[in-house]
Amino acid sequence: MVSTNLTALLSTLITSNHILHYHNVLDAYGHVSVRNPNNASTFFLSKQLAPALVSSPADINEYYVSSGEAVNSSDPAGYAERYIHSEILKRFPQVNSVVHSHSEDVIPYGIAGVDMRPSYHMAGFLGSKVPVFEIEQYYNNSQVHDMLVSTNPLGAALASLFANSSSSNAPTNTLVVMRGHGFATIGANLTESTFRAYFAASNARVQRKALTLAALAAKDGELGHTDGVRYLDMREQADASVMNDWSSSKPWAMWVREVEVNPLYVNTLGTPPV
Ligand SMILES: [Zn+2]
């Protein structure tokens, strides 16, 4: 029998899976994790199944932060990329939730040589420019080059891009784009990581549309009147980031209701706290 607070946490984890699928941030792949509030050395992550189909505690495993391996050794190993979660949670004690996504909206920023930048007020949390994880820098010749973060060292390399120095265990970035793969983002809790994943994909769409429009306008003598896309400046980004932090719980109730009334999504633990 799990405790009341753990029931609420796992219910929230199930619903986060559903919300991120409903909004096309996660597809059949991708995952979201949360640290155990009763034991900071372990975390919870769904087993090897699609996010939309996660529905009960039986679909969730507990893993060690130190190794990324299942606490119960008789459990299946789980996602090949669980080291994304374990290594980020290991490096940053104040991070309690991680989302890894293969969002088609974000992937182009890892391969087109275009930095993702905060393009509107809901994406101030992105910082002035989003770093790109170039996995080829960390491969060795003997391993499969399938782009997956499937070892502890690759997870640690990805985690390192969330900090601005090799010794820091306080994140200075909230999101990292992964070349040819997707992105990873972090939060103090599931609400924050879900918010950041949602608005990272949204910002990617806004920025792409702005770049496209600016390129078209540049060819038009009457429409083209600027020097290109204007992103949030440094002060706007920083202040919007503070606003993002205090407002990140606002859309949560709506997102919970959207998946609650959709028959695709089942949560046997009931509706999480809003
Ligand atoms: Zn992946």
Image (cartoon, rainbow, N blue to C red):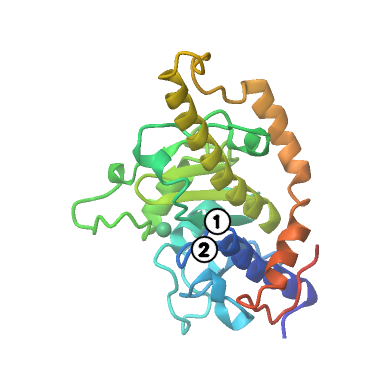
Q: Residue at x 54, y 47 (%)?
A: 201
Residue 93 seen in the current view: no
Ligand 1's image quarter is bottom left
Q: Which of the numbered marks, if any, corresponds to residue 99? A: 1
Q: Which residue is mark 2?
A: 31
What secondary structure is found at the residue carrying circle 1?
strand
What secondary structure is found at the residue carrying circle 2?
strand
Residue in the foreground of this view, choosing between 57 and 263: 263
Q: Name the amino acid, label 1.
A: Val
**Image-quadrant location for residue 137:** top left
Q: Name the amino acid, label 2.
A: His
Mark 2 Cβ and ligand 1 under 8 Å apart: no
- Image spot of residue 251 (x, y percent): 74, 53
144 left or right, relative to 269: left
138 left or right, relative to 29: left
Residue in the foreground of this view, choosing between 226 and 101: 226
Is mark 1 in CB contact (under 8 Å) with mark 2?
yes
- Image spot of residue 134 (x, y percent): 35, 42
- Image spot of residue 149 (x, y percent): 38, 56
